[in-house]
Amino acid sequence: MAHTLSAKKRIRQTETRTAANRAAMSRVRTLRKKVAQAVAAKDKEGAEAAYNRFSSAVDKAAKKGTVHANRAANYKSKAAKALASLS
């Protein structure tokens, strides 16, 4: 167990940040699945709406450092490619 005040504070900060990161990544994964489901159902309008929500969530996660910027770009690129296959 931590003894110093600074170590105790770091533990509190880590717990808070871990919770925020988990929530952000859970949201990204859920929205990614919704895009994939809409594409599989060949619902172009639904897929576009889902993609817009997904890309926003990925950008926010990347901005906060939860996911690396290149990984975020990779996620968005794959989703956009799947969306383009509906045309």
Image (cartoon, helix red, strand yellow):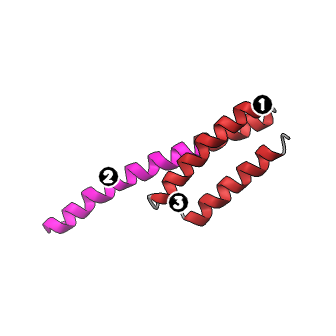
Amino acid type at circle 2 is: Thr
Q: CA distance from mark 2 to mark 1?
A: 38 Å
Task: Out of 30 and 84, give the one closest to the viewer.
Answer: 84
Amino acid type at circle 3 is: Val
Q: Residue at x 71, y 36 (%)?
A: 47
| Percent coordinates x, y for residue 82 in the rendering | 78, 47
Q: Nearer the viewer, mark 1 or mark 3?
A: 1
Q: Nearer the viewer, mark 2 or mark 3?
A: 3
Residue 65 lies left or right of residue 17; in this view the side is: right
Within-10-Å neighbours for mark 1: few <14, some 14–19, many 20+: some
The residue to which callout 1 is attached is 43
Within-10-Å neighbours for mark 2: few <14, some 14–19, many 20+: few
The residue to which callout 3 is attached is 67
Decide: marks 2, 1 in contact (CB < 8 A)? no
Q: Magenta segment: does it hold 85? A: no
Q: Earlier in the sequence, mark 2 or mark 3?
A: 2
Q: Quadrant of residue 49?
A: top right
Q: Secondary structure at mark 3?
A: loop
Bounds of the magenta segment: 1-29
Residue 24 lies left or right of residue 43; in this view the side is: left
Q: Residue at x 36, y 55 (%)?
A: 17
Tell me the number on the disc at residue 16: 2
Decide: marks 1, 3 in contact (CB < 8 A)? no
Q: CA distance from mark 1 to mark 3?
A: 28 Å
